[in-house]
Structures are given as structure tokens and as C-alpha cells.
């Protein structure tokens, strides 16, 4: 158990819809990262927050947005969903920025 | 442009033998590297790391070697066990970034009984 909690574990929705994925980092970790993994491909970095502020952006689509709340949990919002958005979305947290990341079990999104 | 490459999508090794997973990087501006292991439908878990000032780091059955002149690192698993069957990701931390790792595409390791 990494200490990072993601909900929901599975989500099935239709094209055009909007979903929110939630992440609770390990206790005390200030950094939260979101990654996307599509069909056994590598991990694509989406976005990182540190103590409530956006710190780095990767290959995140404009239809996607994220935030980190004062209690340090984070949400990833995916809107106008397309079939290609079907993927595993991982959240990770770290005590020191960029250092060892602890990953949650992921949220599997299926867009039909 | 900093990149981390794992050129072997998969590797099959007999149980009890040595598994060697390879990773190349494109320039010298990384200050440390990490290896992660991932089972299907689970998040990656940290295995072992190495600072760019070292050439070897060992932790139990896992040893990472760093060859700076060749811009190459490798993860050795000895002896390989069935539970080692997983996808292994190599990641590098750029010196000029506090924030994010650069990931390889992963190598699927299959341990044959």
C-alpha cells in the first residue's frame, strides 16, 4: 500500500461526458502528480501541483484540468470525453519535488 | 531535448537466471535515475535509484549500474523469480527541474518457470 488513494477505481462513461478523478496523497506529501497510461504504453505526465499551486504541465489536453485543494487532495477533471481518453490515470505524490514518487492504484476510465 | 529510452519492449528470462533491463538517456543533464516496477492494473512501485555521481547501487537482488560515458544504465535482478514478472520503467530526473521525471516506455519482463 503506497498510501496514495485514488477514486473511483473504474469508471465507464460515454463520449461527450465529463468525469472527475480524485486523489488523496500520502500523509505529509505536498506534491501531487497526474499521469496517463494508454493501452500498455508508457506513463505520460499530465500535470503537477505543489501545496495547492500548479508547478509543471506536461501533455495535458485543454479539455482536462486539475486542482489541488487546501487539504492537499487533488482532482483531475476530464471533459468532452473522446474514445481516445480511455486510459489508466495515475496519481502520485512525493515528499520532495521530483524525487521518489508513490503511485496510487489508478483510475481506469473507459469511454464508450 | 532530454529523453530516456527503453528500447526493448519485452524480455523473457528463465527463473533463477539473471535479468538485465536496459535504459539509455540522451544527454548528461540528469542528476539521478530511478527504476519502477508495475504489475497490471496497479500503480508503479519504486524499486531502486542511483545518483549520477555513482556507478553502482545495490539493494538485495536488485543492482543498478550507471555508465555515464555510454549514457546507459541497467537493472540487474539476480536470481530472477516469478514475482519479478512485471513492466519495468526507467526514469531520469533532469538537473534543471525540481518537478518532474522523464520516463522510458517500459520493458515487460517475463520470468519463465
Image (cartoon, coloured by chain):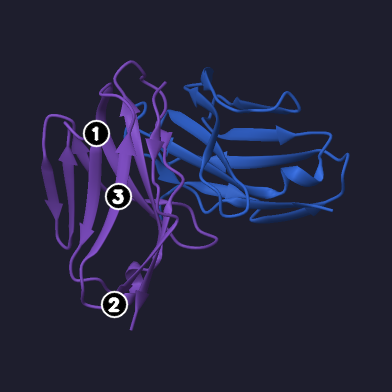
Chain colours: A blue, B purple
Q: Chain of mark 1?
A: B
- Closer to the chain start, of discs 3 and 2, is 2
| Residue drawn at point x = 21 percent, y = 57 percent | B76
Q: Secondary structure at mark 3?
A: strand
Q: Which mark is residue B22?
A: 3
Given the current orientation, which residue lies at the most extreme bottom position? Answer: B113
The front one of A24 and A39 is A39
Label 2 to label 1, Cα distance in Å? 28 Å
Q: Are marks 3 and 1 in contact (CB under 8 Å)?
A: no
Whether A86 is drawn above or below B85: the answer is above
Residue A96 visible in the snapshot:
no
Image mark count = 3
| Residue drawn at point x = 84 percent, y = 53 percent | A112
Residue labelled with disc 2 = B14
Label 3 to label 2, Cα distance in Å? 17 Å
The front one of A109 and B103 is B103
Residue A74 visible in the snapshot:
yes
Label 3 to label 1, Cα distance in Å? 11 Å
Amino acid at each position: 500500500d503506497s498510501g496514495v488513494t485514488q477514486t473511483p477505481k473504474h469508471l465507464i462513461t460515454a463520449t461527450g461526458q465529463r468525469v472527475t478523478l480524485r486523489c488523496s496523497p500520502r500523509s505529509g506529501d505536498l506534491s501531487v502528480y497526474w499521469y496517463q497510461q494508454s493501452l500498455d504504453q508508457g506513463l505520460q505526465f499530465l500535470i503537477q501541483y505543489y501545496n495547492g499551486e500548479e508547478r509543471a504541465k506536461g501533455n495535458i489536453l485543454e479539455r482536462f484540468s486539475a486542482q489541488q485543494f487546501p487539504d492537499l487532495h487533488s482532482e483531475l477533471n476530464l471533459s468532452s470525453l473522446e474514445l481516445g481518453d480511455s486510459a489508466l490515470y495515475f496519481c502520485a505524490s512525493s515528499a520532495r519535488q521530483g524525487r521518489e514518487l508513490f503511485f496510487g492504484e489508478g483510475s481506469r476510465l473507459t469511454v464508450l | 531535448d532530454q529523453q530516456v529510452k527503453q528500447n526493448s519492449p519485452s524480455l523473457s528470462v528463465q527463473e533463477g537466471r539473471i535479468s538485465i533491463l536496459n535504459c539509455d538517456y540522451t544527454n548528461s543533464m540528469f542528476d539521478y535515475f530511478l527504476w519502477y516496477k508495475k504489475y497490471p492494473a496497479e500503480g508503479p512501485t519504486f524499486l531502486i535509484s542511483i545518483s549520477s555521481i555513482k556507478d553502482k547501487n545495490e539493494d538485495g537482488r536488485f543492482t543498478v549500474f550507471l555508465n555515464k560515458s555510454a549514457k546507459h544504465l541497467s537493472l540487474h535482478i539476480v536470481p530472477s523469480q516469478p514475482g519479478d514478472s512485471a513492466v519495468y520503467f526507467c526514469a531520469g530526473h533532469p538537473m534543471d527541474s525540481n518537478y518532474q521525471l522523464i520516463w522510458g516506455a517500459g520493458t515487460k519482463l517475463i520470468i519463465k518457470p
